């Protein structure tokens, strides 16, 4: 998920960071003897619950990785953090990675991050409207104002796809940028007609009388891969052993999280501030270990159709 | 004995002269709390977007026991104090240097006026590029914003040196060090302390802003996490905490001002004549 407030600076930042990273060329430090110290840039949301669980369960320690998780705003800050070596790995949504890779940013995906449940009516991402809104389905969103957390990113392409699949005009919708936390109030005030949100906001807006009208992740592709763990191409080539151990630890964490939803709901209370009632009720995403390449190709195609992705990234170089 | 004559007071501290400063202050806070309770209760703003004050206080009580709250407070206070310390030191040193050399003053005047209004938050991309999301990122923003008030106050203080006092110092053939001690220091100190007090608040605002926007560790980051978790009462509780920190900073700055300037007329003029 790309909820970052620094987005306007993305291009400048990545360019500058690249320059600095190339100049300083300070690789990930290989600890001599002891465990590898690894910092991962994540976002304090439900999507990354498995890695917190894996840390707690010792899946990283058992592979000689001393893991520290740095929860930030995500987006370009995570990407530049990985490039500069502040983070060894990062968590980012697929469209952001495709955009960065298209711009030639040297990134390498190492593990699956989070996936949609693919179920209409029971996913962790939805387009919400007020209870008394005239909007009944995705097709009605045409001509309306929809809030997304980041313009020209995964929210835009998937919501347009929902409208397209329902037979509406996907070009007629107007997007406006707003942080997820601000959307409920904007919806109430009538500043926006609909809001694309993810959990816990699907639950909180529903509890406040809101209504889902589109399940954009479920609409976009079957079992859509939404986000991925990645590293810099440099770390992947210079320290393939560490990357492989990290991948194995993340995969074990994803499997563990899928098997123990109660543990997920519990660990959410440690790194987020989601209330206990919402934690118990919210829809959890899926955490398969396999990256759904077909769905990533779909996201790429959608991005190109909507004019968000202009240069083709090399998928074989980006994906493992 | 100083050659110093009484300068115009930059911003006289009136707190000391008020009879009942604390009760009045508390009454103001109580009125605010009442308003914050009434506005959501009366439905002027929906409760789920702005919880009543009592719910915020309940959330605050919960926060005090939450793991990660006190470390966040410590991180913010660390960033604030380190940033303010750096800014104050740099402001005084640069101010005395520039202020004492007329050529330097003329050379830098327009540059200072050009740099000063640049909002510190505009430097966020630079800070993130240089230091990522760590403490130095916050420090860059804090120091940049809180350096100017100290510098300008010190410059104003040095410009305010009484010509008669300066002439007297010359007559007595005071050396550079003695002039610093008996002429520049007493005249500039009240100004510098005012600058420091202004900077103290600015530094806190920037510390929280940096954490909120960049994600540097501290209260601001915790506010961002509460936001993204949809935990509205907790978010306001943390905002109240930043307000309380600001209050503490201001009280401490005023106390420090009274202590440092105990000899100065702005402080000495109180009825009790505490010295």
Image: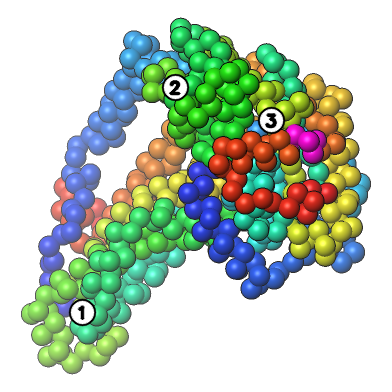
Q: Position of residue B189 (x, y in %)?
A: 26, 67
Please report, as a chain letter, where disc 2 is located.
A
Q: Nearer the viewer, mark 2 or mark 3?
A: 2
The residue under label 2 is A144
Residue A294 falls inside the magenta stretch? yes
As helix, strand or loop, the secondary structure at mark 2 comes to loop
Tag 3, which chain? A
Q: Is residue B29 above or below residue A307?
A: above
The reply, left or right, for residue A48 in relation to residue B129 is right
Q: Secondary structure at mark 1?
A: helix
Q: CA distance from mark 2 to mark 3?
A: 29 Å
Element under disc 3:
helix
> How would you rate the neighbour count of disc 3 (Cα within 10 Å): few for under 14, some for 14-19, many for 20 or more?
many
Residue at figure coordinates x 81%, y 43% from the top left: A111
Closest to the camera, between mark 1 and mark 2, is: 2
Picture layout, residue A26 above or below residue B107: above
Which callout, 2 or 3, points at the residue further toward the start of the chain?
3
**Image quadrant occupied by the N terminus of chain A:** top right
Instruction: Tell me residue A27's x, y (percent).
Output: 74, 66
Category of crowding for the residue at label 1, using alpha-carbon neighbours closer than 10 angstroms: few (below 14), some (14–19), many (at least 20) = few
State which mark lies toward you, 1 or 3: 3
Q: Residue at x 44, y 58 (%)?
A: B123
Q: Is residue B258 left or right of residue A177?
A: left
Give B238 or B30, whichever is nearer the viewer.
Answer: B238
Examine the image and state in which quarter residue B260 appears. bottom left
Residues beneath discs 1 and 2 located on the same chain: no
Between B131 and B201, the one lying in front of the other is: B131
User: Label 1 lies in what chain?
Assistant: B
Nearer to me, B109 or B1 = B109
Residue pointed to by mark 1:
B106
- Residue that badge 3 annotates: A46
What residue range appears in magenta?
A: A292-296
């Amino acid at each position: 998920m790309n909820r970052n407030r620094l987005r306007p600076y993305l291009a400048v930042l990545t360019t500058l960071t690249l320059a600095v990273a190339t100049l300083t060329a300070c690789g990930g430090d290989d600890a001599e003897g002891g465990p590898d110290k690894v910092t991962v840039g994540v976002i304090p949301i439900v999507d990354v619950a498995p890695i917190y669980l894996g840390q707690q369960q010792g899946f990283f320690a058992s592979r000689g990785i001393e893991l520290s998780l740095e929860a930030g705003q995500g987006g370009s800050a995570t990407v530049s953090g990985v490039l500069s070596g502040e983070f060894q790995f990062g968590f980012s949504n697929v469209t952001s990675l495709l955009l960065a890779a298209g711009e030639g940013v040297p990134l390498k995906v190492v593990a699956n991050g989070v996936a949609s449940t693919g179920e209409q009516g029971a996913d962790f991402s939805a387009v919400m409207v007020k209870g008394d809104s005239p909007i009944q389905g995705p097709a009605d969103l045409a001509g309306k104002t929809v809030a997304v957390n980041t313009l020209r990113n995964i929210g835009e392409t998937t919501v347009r796809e929902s409208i397209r699949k329902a037979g509406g005009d996907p070009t007629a919708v107007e997007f406006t940028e707003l942080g997820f936390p601000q959307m409920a109030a904007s919806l109430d005030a009538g500043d926006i007609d609909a809001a694309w949100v993810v959990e816990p906001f699907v639950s909180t807006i529903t509890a406040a009388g809101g209504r889902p009208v589109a399940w954009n992740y479920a609409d976009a592709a079957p079992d859509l891969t939404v986000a991925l763990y990645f590293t810099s191409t440099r770390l992947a080539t210079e320290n393939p052993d560490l990357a492989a151990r990290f991948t194995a630890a993340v995969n074990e964490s994803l499997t563990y999280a899928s098997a123990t939803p109660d543990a997920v709901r519990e660990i959410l209370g440690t790194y987020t501030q989601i209330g206990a009632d919402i934690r118990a009720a919210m829809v959890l995403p899926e955490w398969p270990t396999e990256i759904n390449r077909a769905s990533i190709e779909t996201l790429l195609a959608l991005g190109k159709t909507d004019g968000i992705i202009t240069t083709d990234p090399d998928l074989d170089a980006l994906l493992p | 004995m100083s050659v110093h004559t009484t300068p115009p007071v930059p911003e006289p501290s009136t707190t000391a002269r008020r009879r009942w400063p604390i009760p009045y202050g508390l009454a103001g806070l109580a009125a605010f709390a009442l308003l914050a309770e009434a506005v959501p209760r009366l439905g002027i703003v929906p409760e789920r977007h702005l919880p009543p004050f009592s719910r915020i206080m309940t959330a605050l009580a919960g926060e005090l026991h939450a793991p990660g709250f006190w470390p966040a407070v410590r991180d913010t206070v660390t960033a604030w104090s380190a940033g303010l310390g750096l800014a104050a030191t740099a402001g005084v040193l640069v101010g005395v240097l520039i202020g004492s050399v007329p050529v330097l003053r003329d050379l830098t005047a327009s540059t200072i006026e050009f740099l000063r209004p640049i909002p510190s938050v505009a430097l966020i991309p630079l800070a993130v590029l240089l230091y990522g999301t760590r403490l130095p990122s916050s420090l860059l923003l804090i120091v940049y914003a809180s350096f100017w008030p100290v510098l300008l106050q010190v410059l104003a203080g040095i410009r305010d040196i009484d010509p008669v006092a300066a002439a007297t110092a010359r007559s007595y053939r005071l050396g550079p060090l003695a002039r610093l001690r008996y002429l520049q220091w007493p005249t500039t100190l009240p100004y510098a302390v005012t600058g420091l007090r202004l900077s103290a608040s600015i530094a806190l605002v920037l510390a929280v802003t940096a954490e909120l926007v960049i994600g540097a560790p501290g209260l601001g980051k915790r506010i961002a996490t509460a936001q993204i978790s949809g935990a509205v009462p907790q978010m306001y509780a943390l905002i109240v905490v930043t307000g309380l920190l600001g209050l503490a900073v201001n009280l401490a700055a005023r106390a420090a001002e009274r202590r440092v300037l105990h000899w100065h007329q702005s402080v000495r003029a109180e009825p009790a004549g505490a010295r």
